[in-house]
Amino acid sequence: MIEIDKHQTLPLTAQDKQFLETRLLESKKDFKLNLIIFIIIWLISPYLRSLSGKDPLIEEMSYPLALAVMSLFFFGYLGYYYYKGLNQVKQALKTDFKIALHSIVVKKKNAPMFHRSEFRLELTCKEFKYHYFPLNLMNEFPQGQLLYIEMSGAGKQLLAIRNA
């Protein structure tokens, strides 16, 4: 009998390690690109008008002070992106086990905010509540379907998902 949402610890295979190493390289490339884009936007942000039509920050304060004000937002987001992207993959690579479980699809949300080309799959498992997938896989996991999920022991990286 299949027990729903009960964790089973399995050793991490060489294929899983390779998958996580590839994901780490992709995350590093993404982070570098985001860093470059954010630094450029950060440097010109004091000259930009706000959406409410207020004057740019450079007219109210000096350029270094305007950069300091804008750095709270930009570097806060970059820190969050580093933690969610790079740090979690690094944690997953440090462990040598993975978690396997069976869970049920509770709900699917089509094109949530900031993920327009993806859909969100909500599961009954509390540790792995939801995950984003490309829209072309939307019909593969219907609501109420029992899924087999493998994720890394740390970092909550999805290694495999399929219908049970």
Image (cartoon, helix red, strand yellow):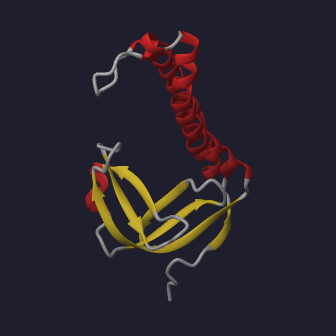
Q: Residue at x 52, y 29 (%)?
A: 74
Report the front residue among 9 and 74: 74
Q: Quadrant of the C terminus?
A: bottom left
Report if residue 71 is visible in the image: yes
Q: Quadrant of residue 156?
A: bottom right
- Residue most extreme to the front: 60
Q: Nearer the viewer, residue 60 or 150?
A: 60
Residue in the foreground of this view, choosing between 66 and 107: 66
| Displayed quadrant of residue 138 | bottom left
| Residue name at image x 47 percent, y 20 percent | 37
Q: Is residue 23 above or below residue 161?
A: above
* Placement of 99 over or under 102, stated as above or below: above
Q: Position of residue 141 (x, y in %)?
A: 32, 65
The total of numbered circles placed on residues is 0
- Seen in the picture, residue 3 relative to 16 is either above or below; the reply is below
The location of residue 33, given as percent across then percent down, is 51, 23
Residue depicted at x 73% and y 55%: 95
- The residue most toward the bottom is 1
Residue 18 visible in the picture: no
Return the x and y of residue 44 as percentages of the image width and height: 45, 13
